[in-house]
Each structure stands twice: as C-alpha cells, then as structure tokens.
Amino acid sequence: MSNVLISPSILAADFARLGEEVRAVDAAGADMIHVDVMDGHYVPNISIGPVVIEKLRPHTKKPFDVHLMISPVDAYLEAFAEAGADIITAHPEAGPHFHRTLQVIKKLGKKAGAALNPSTPADVLDPVLEELDLILVMSVNPGFGGQKFIESQLRKIETIRTKLDRADLKTILEVDGGIVPGNAQAVIDAGATALVAGSAIFGKGAARYAAEIAALRGR
C-alpha cells in the first residue's frame, strides 16, 4: 500500500448533495478535499466560487485543496482564503507576476501551489521552486472532468521529482486528470505524492468511496 495523499475532486460529486458528499469522502479516508474553481475564461467551464467553499467548510476538518483556474487570479485570492481554503493553487499564466501571487497567498496564511497545464514546461517553476508548498501537474487539459490521462505528463512528473529531490524540498507533488486505479501506481512511481481523483471516486455511491480511495493507494 502507498502512503500517497488522496484528494477527491468534488467537481465529480453530486452538486445537490455537496455537504453530504464531502462528509462521505472524509469518512472514507480522503486526506484533502480538492476544489476546482473555473471561471469560463481561463478554462471553458464555470464551476463554483468562494461562497460554496464557505458553506462546505463546516462539513470537514480536512484541508481544502483549492485549484484556481481563473484569470486574472490575484484579485480573488483573499476571498478564497477567507472562505476556508487551506492550499491555494494558481497557474503561472494567470497573472503577470507569479512570484507576487505566491507572496500574497503566503501573506494570507495559506499554503501556496503552482499548477502546470500539459503544455507548460516544468522549468517555469525554477525561479519560485522554494516558495511552493504544492506543485500540481495537470495530466489533462483543465476545464472538464472525465478526460483521459495524457501519458507524456509522466516525464514531467519525473522531472519535477528530480528537481525537488536535488533541492531537498518536501513540496507536495500532486497530479490531477484521468487518475484511475489502473494508472495510479505509474504516477506514484514517477514521483507523485498526492493524487486528485473525481470520477474514479464519486458517482458509485458513498458505500464505495473507501474502496475506491484504497484502490488508488494500492498496487
């Protein structure tokens, strides 16, 4: 069994029962709750905003792992921090000064993450590597759930793992997109320490959540 962190993405949950769904994956062994925020501009979809996060916050004590797929991002950092986000992850392309974005997140008392689209090279993070608490490798193009894993991202995961190990950094290396039990071990072997999964967990009934989370951790 792997000790990889599992962060279920509520984008795939039943939106009519979000509080109940969050409580169910918490009880099933989730380490974090992944919240995908999409603005219809940076990505071609719209999801949720700070108010929903605020309403979900009382339903779990697990960290809210909030992925902001919005641009410009800086103007909304405070709102998501105040709503209850614990980790705030932004894309380097979503603002003119990414180092400043990370500084603001840290000043708000939150952990700071960087998300890399499939076409964004790992070297983009070199100037800010030591500022990051989390790196999110997108293994699909962001915007929609249920997509197929892009195999080429395994090499990017390996590259980032090498960078982190050489710098002796304990940064969480998270992967999101098309993660299923059939490819989870390859992602872990490449160096990931956290997996985001949506449709691989949700949609099969709460009684199955613990088994699905365990399947992502196991060989």
Image (cartoon, rainbow, N blue to C red):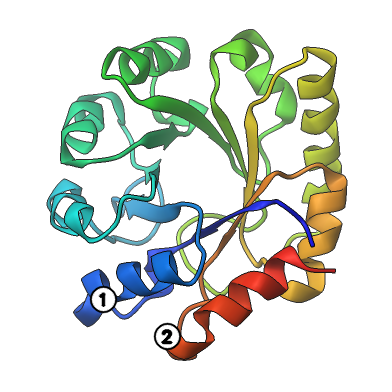
Amino acid carrying label 1: it is Glu
Q: Is residue 161 above or below residue 163?
A: below
Q: Which mark is residue 20?
A: 1
Q: Position of residue 195 (x, y in %)?
A: 63, 55
Q: Secondary structure at mark 1?
A: helix
Q: Which residue corresponds to mark 2?
A: 206
The tag earlier along the polypeptide, 1 or 2, is 1
Quarter of the image that includes the C terminus: bottom right
Give the residue drawn at x 70%, y 75%: 215
Q: Is residue 108 above or below residue 32?
A: above
Q: Is residue 17 above or below residue 133?
A: below
Amino acid carrying label 2: it is Ala
Q: Position of residue 179 (x, y in %)?
A: 67, 66
Q: Position of residue 146 (x, y in %)?
A: 55, 75
Give the residue drawn at x 33%, y 53%: 38
Front position in the image: 102 or 214: 214
Tell me, yes or no, if residue 32 can be seen here.
yes
